[in-house]
Image (spheres, grey):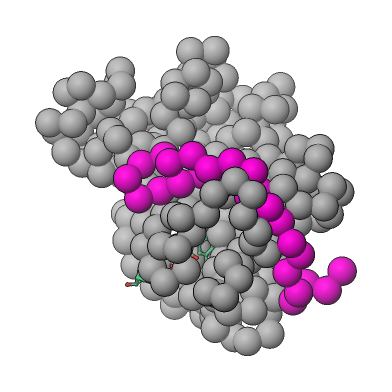
């Protein structure tokens, strides 16, 4: 497989999730690694012919038949035209790339997933993997925050997983007025404040974080106060990327490359690298 050449994919479904975010389902050649063998936290490069190419996280779980789910926020020169794609349209994909969440390390542990805004997309992939083998974990907790209730991604699915007893779920939004009519147990709070609701066993808990990098230092510092070692905290970082395969150097994180050494790093790996998480 040549990882620098996109393979064709066809849009099979489009679902508008919020005013500026869509869920695209793509179909590609059955059994191709880009669809069949990715891990939660990894990403692919999505190309729109004649427009450009961007890194996007996997937000589903590998299923037979070559289908891929991607959650895309329409913000710029590639992602805005992607709002207009429809079933039957052609795109290109190459991947999977990068290092995802360390699933084997999570076996037998309590897991806390912390998602802010669009960070719910890669964490949904992890959540689905953990739910699929629910017998392998202890507690499975999701802390999820967004600007307003309408921006809480995959809310119906999360409430259903909670109702079925798969997950403990704590939700927060920034704005009070929207929360009043929102889902049960939704607080008006910032993401780090949700940690105050948890009583964790720090010796058997791992934490996976994906959200706006500006909240990472606060989350990490609160988790450390709760007794969590840095090696038990995993963060997904975003950097501007070009090649996605470690050749161009665009995505440097200290002495590492985000596209091959990340995007998921343990906090222990970032300590001493003078990497600004903000
Ligand atoms: C490993 C990795 C995984 C990613 N996964 C996803 C994903 O699952 N879904 C997704 O939608 N995006 C994801 N991104 C970000 C995505 O690649 C960027 O949104 C995209 O590169 C923006 O491209 P653009 O050409 O549309 O915007 P540009 O034209 O490059 O940017 C336009 C404007 O939008 C701003 N901008 C860029 N990105 C964002 C953003 N994410 N949020 C708010 N403002 C932004 C820029 O600063 C600029 O001001 C990921 C990035 C990385 C590195
Ligand atoms: S994007 Fe080119 S080295 Fe990472």
Placement of 262 over or under 177, stated as above or below:
below
The answer to whether any part of residue 269 appears in the image is: no
Q: Quadrant of ligand 1?
A: bottom left
221 lies left or right of 59: left
Q: Is residue 8 magenta?
A: yes
What are the residue bounds of the magenta stretch? 1-26
- Using the image as rendered, state which of residue 19 and residue 152 is in the foreground: 19
Instruction: Specify the quadrant that holds the C terminus.
Output: bottom left
Q: Position of residue 97 (x, y in %)?
A: 69, 64
Nearest the viewer among 44 and 273 is: 44
Q: Residue at x 44, y 77 (%)?
A: 274
Question: Residue placed at 48% from the left, 59% from the top?
Answer: 82
Residue at 32 percent across and 45 percent down: it is: 19
Q: Is residue 240 magenta?
A: no
Between 245 and 3, the residue placed more toward the observer is 3
Q: In the image, is 260 to the left or to the right of 18?
A: right
* Residue 5, horizontal then vertical, whole percent: 76, 74
Q: From the viewer's side, name the closer residue of 116 and 59.
A: 59
């Amino acid at each position: 497989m040549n990882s620098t050449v996109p393979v064709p994919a066809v849009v099979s479904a489009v679902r508008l999730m919020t005013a500026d975010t869509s869920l695209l389902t793509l179909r590609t050649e059955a059994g191709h690694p880009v669809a069949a063998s990715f891990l939660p936290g990894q990403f692919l490069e999505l190309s729109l012919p004649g427009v450009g190419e961007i890194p996007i996280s996997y937000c589903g779980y590998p299923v037979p038949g070559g289908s891929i789910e991607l959650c895309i926020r329409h913000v710029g020169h590639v992602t805005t035209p992607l709002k207009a794609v429809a079933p039957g349209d052609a795109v290109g994909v190459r991947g999977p790339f990068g290092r995802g969440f360390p699933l084997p390390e999570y076996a037998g542990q309590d897991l806390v997933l912390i998602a802010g805004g669009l960070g719910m997309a890669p964490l949904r992939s992890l959540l689905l993997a953990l739910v699929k083998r629910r017998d392998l974990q202890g507690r499975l907790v999701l802390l999820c925050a967004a600007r307003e209730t309408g921006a809480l991604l995959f809310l119906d699915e999360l409430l259903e997983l909670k109702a079925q007893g798969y997950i403990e779920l704590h939700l927060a939004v920034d704005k009070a007025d929207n929360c009043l009519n929102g889902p049960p147990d939704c607080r008006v709070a910032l993401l780090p404040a949700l940690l105050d609701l948890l009583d964790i066993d720090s010796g058997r808990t791992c934490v996976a974080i994906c959200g706006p990098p500006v909240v990472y230092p606060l989350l990490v510092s609160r988790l450390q106060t709760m007794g969590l070692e840095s090696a038990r905290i995993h963060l997904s970082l975003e950097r501007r990327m070009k090649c996605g395969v470690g050749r161009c150097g665009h995505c440097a994180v200290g002495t590492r490359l985000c596209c091959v050494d990340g995007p998921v790093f343990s906090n222990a790996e970032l300590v001493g690298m003078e990497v600004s998480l903000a």
